[in-house]
Amino acid sequence: MKSPKLTSPDWSLGIVVLFLMVIGMIMMFSTTSVTGLSQYGDAYYFVKKHGIFLLVGLGLFVLGIRIPHQVYKEYAFQGFFFGVFLLLLTLFPVLGVKVGGAQRWLNLGAFYLQPVEIMKFFIAVFLSVSLANKQTEIKDFMKSVGPILLMLMVPIMILAKQPDLGNIILILLVTFSLLFLAETPLSHMFALLSSGLVLIATSIMLYPYQLRRIKSFLDPWKDPLGQNYHIIQSFIAIGSGGFLGHGIGQSKLKYFYLPLHYSDFVFSILCEEGGWIFAVIVLGLFGALLYRGCFIAVKAPTQYAYFLALAITFFLVFQALLNIGVVIGVFPVTGIPLTFISYGGSSYVMSLFLVGVLLNISRSRA
């Protein structure tokens, strides 16, 4: 077998990500000044912090491009259990930080770290190695899908304890998609789907606030000033934008009407200020990201690289689709940020690293 030929990275993917990052920075300037001034006395407080995340993320982006993607294969299981260890630390009162009813962050003194963002990369590597090694056994549940699901149950149960239903759904979606593309028998897929539904139902029963979110999703107009306030304000922001929007910086909902307007609900303000046309551009960019990621996967020289490129692409794009689905009322509120656009350190930094790894895979050709 010939060794893969190294070429230049797929910079068309880099250009797509650059456009998304520029839109994200524009939205940071537009949405955070009011909150920054009122809470910290500095209109550029969040912009400065976002700039730090950008610099750190670009450093990891360069590392992702330079480190051969084959290296991660050698440490797939060590990395997986390291990610599990970081997730476990969030459950300890001294280290774990609870925000909005969920204990998902680690207090590292100078900054907060959300370990699930690191865990998602190690899950991508683990799934890629496992599926590549088990292609000849994919029809045997006990030798292929069974062990994979058993391993994934460990981080998923910790996420359920935090709780973090949004990332549980995201991980299950990516896993389901990879198993489908690996030509897993439908009976095995049904087992995964059933397991996922049981886990989600269990999480909802254990944590009443998640059940309240489901009820709010089913009838958002029932309590517009209470439990459903977020989504109603999101609808108002999106609807008022019309076709062309009110103009960048001209949002009215960011004046303390729409909570989390610079993070989880930034797409609502994007629609209010940029209108339907701006929303379509953003969706088109994520569509282009999906296309280029799948193109890189198809051209990958090995099964491992193929599945890794797909896993990374799916994590980046599915996260964005979940976020957009929440703000337009298609999904219940999950707390998932909009990739490359929402304010958020761990997610933003790791997303740039994932793009770097994807570009490193693109350098190899079969």
Image (cartoon, rainbow, N blue to C red):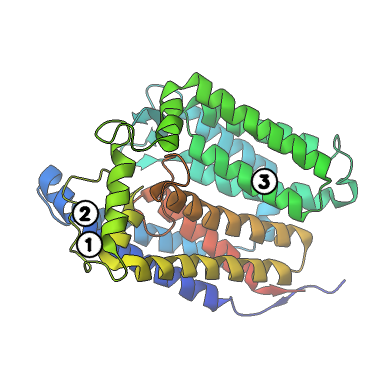
- Where's residue 39, x and y in %? 14, 43
Q: CA distance from mark 1 to mark 2?
A: 6 Å
Q: Is residue 145 left or right of residue 21?
A: right
Q: Identify the residue shown where x is 22% and y is 62%.
A: 29
Name the N-terminal-most of marks 1 and 3.
1
Mark 3 sits on what residue?
175
Label 2 is placed on what type of residue?
Answer: Thr
Task: For the residues labelled 1 and 2, say whether their Cβ atoms are less than 8 Å apart.
Answer: yes
Q: Nearer the viewer, residue 212 or 139?
A: 212
Q: The residue under label 3 is which amino acid type?
A: Thr
Q: Residue at x 57, y 30 (%)?
A: 200
The answer to whether 170 appears left or right of 240 in the picture is: right
Residue that badge 1 annotates: 29
Q: Is residue 332 visible?
A: yes
Q: Secondary structure at mark 3?
A: helix
Q: Is residue 37 left or right of residue 78?
A: left
Dot 2: within a 10 Å radius of its alpha carbon, few (fewer than 14), some, or many (20 or more) residues?
Answer: many
Dot 1, crowdedness within 10 Å: few (<14), some or many (≥20)? some
Q: Quadrant for the C terminus, please.
A: bottom right
Query: Residue under circle 2?
Result: 32
Q: Using the image, determine if residue 288 lies above or below residue 98.
A: below
257 lies left or right of 315: left
- Please tell me in which quadrant of the rendered image residue 342 appears: bottom left
Q: Nearer the viewer, residue 30 or 217?
A: 217
Q: Tell me if label 1 and label 3 are in contact, CB under 8 Å.
A: no
Q: Secondary structure at mark 2?
A: loop
Q: CA distance from mark 1 to mark 3?
A: 36 Å
Image disc number at residue 257: none
Query: Looking at the picture, how far across and down is residue 43, in whole percent?
Result: 13, 55
Q: Earlier in the sequence, mark 2 or mark 3?
A: 2
